[in-house]
Amino acid sequence: MDWDDERVPQSELAAKEIELFRETVRRVKRTMPFYAERLRDVDPDAIRTPEDIALVPTTNKADLRAQPYPSAIGVPLTDVMELHASSGTTGSAVVTGYTASDLQLWRTAMKRVLQRAGVHRGDIVHNAYGYGLFTGGLGFHYAALETGVTVLPISGGQTQRQVTMLRDLKATVLTCTPSYGQHIAEVMRQMGVAKDEMSLRVGVFGAEAWSQQMCDEIESEMGITALDVYGLAEIIGPGVASECAEGHKGLHVSEDLFYFEVIDPQTGKPVPDGTLGELVLTALRREASPVVRYRTGDITRVIPGSCECGRTTRRMDHILGRVDDMFTLRGVNLFPRDVESALLDMDALAPVYQLVLDRHQALDVLEVHVEPRETEAERGVLAAAVQRRLNEVLGVSVMVAVMDPLSIPRSEGKAVRVVDRRKLTYAR
């Protein structure tokens, strides 16, 4: 069976997944002391159904941090060809290793990302993800090499130069975080470079939760199809799942490489397809840094039904946010994306924002920082309009501050959307 074919019947794919899961459990119990202890009561041969898998203990980031390199490596250290680390945005980074086989697995997964996006020979990939320990840059670099297309390894920063290179080298594919894609579009306007001067056709954006409104903004500003990609270093890097250009309705998971589940973050039990919950992943073929039932902290859902593109792999929805990104404001649970969706519907605002949580007289308050799209905008009128919009959409009152143009920090990597001053207060 050719497992590079994403049109294998779902029944065959599901059976193969369970077989690979059994093999993974058997292997990690043999090669990794942490899993030998954690899974000591798990009989791999008894795992026959998804219900059996749901009984296997989960792993989380705290577990990985407690097993620092090299104790979390499941192969001889001489077999480790490359090291990467998580971005470390919510705590210390987790180092993860790759054997030659792992690197090929990653290249295969990333090749599918570009194939789903319709990338083919003759395309030029402008890769503005950061290179280095963060897996984004090299992940897409490997994808381009595996697909046989030209790649420009420009990384992040020097955005005016990025715009010039995009135009002059006639790149057809842009890869970066969505917030940096927004920033590139903003700098294009500042430089007077029209989207018609570009050759861009498609962008593949990931490493952040982003809303449909942000997607629409990028597509409109740059004249491209904007597609989502998902992954994390603890599993492999980017490439776990991505959107297809044809369907544009959810992210196809490479199920022969990664087993995915969605669970209730409170109870740990599986939720029905279509229900929001926490994404749990198992790397089915990884050698150096395998993880079993890893709780990602990312909120998504399984999308029921088949995709019009013809691929048979199951799909997950876009990431709504992280379990630890959710904040509660006077009893209302909110994600940054809830605010983003409302703001990006307002044409008078630049596509940037920051949420500042604070405490005033024992009450939590949220101040939303925005920028006007036009410098001559009447700030008081704009602030009142934004406040009405947010109060209506969020169901809770917020304050709004209209900042000077270009004063909110732009991101060349992952955007910092929330500043929680309440935590600073408690730390004193």
Image (cartoon, rainbow, N blue to C red):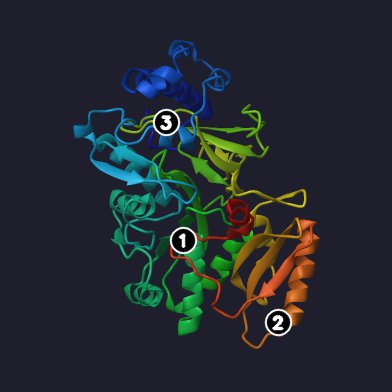
Is 151 left or right of 78, judged from the image as shown?
right
Which disc is residue 203 wearing?
A: 1
Label 3 CA crowd tier, 10 Å (few <14, some 14–19, many 20+): many
Check disc 1 and give the amino acid type.
Gly
Q: Quadrant of the C terminus?
A: bottom right
Q: Position of residue 159 (x, y in %)?
A: 40, 73
Mark 2 element type: helix
Picture residue at 47% right of the left edge, 35% below the top: 62
The label nearer to you, 3 versus 1, is 3
Which disc is residue 379 wearing?
A: 2
Q: Nearest the camera: 403 or 158?
A: 403
Q: Position of residue 329 (x, y in %)?
A: 73, 53
Picture residue at 59% right of the left edge, 59% below the top: 418
Check disc 3 and give the amino acid type.
Val
Picture residue at 74% right of the left edge, 81% below the top: 380
The label nearer to you, 2 versus 3, is 2
Is 69 left or right of 306, judged from the image as shown?
left
The Cα–Cα distance between marks 2 and 3, rounded to whole angstroms, is 50 Å
* Circle 3 residue: 291
Q: Position of residue 42 (x, y in %)?
A: 47, 14
The Cα–Cα distance between marks 1 and 2, rounded to whole angstroms, is 33 Å
Label 1 CA crowd tier, 10 Å (few <14, some 14–19, many 20+): many
Mark 3 element type: loop
Q: Is residue 217 above or below residue 318?
A: below
- Residue 22 visible? The answer is no
Q: Quadrant of the N terminus?
A: top left
Label 2 CA crowd tier, 10 Å (few <14, some 14–19, many 20+): some
* Pointer 3 or 1: first along the chain: 1
* Pointer 2 or 3: first along the chain: 3
Q: Position of residue 203 (x, y in %)?
A: 46, 61
Mark 1 element type: strand
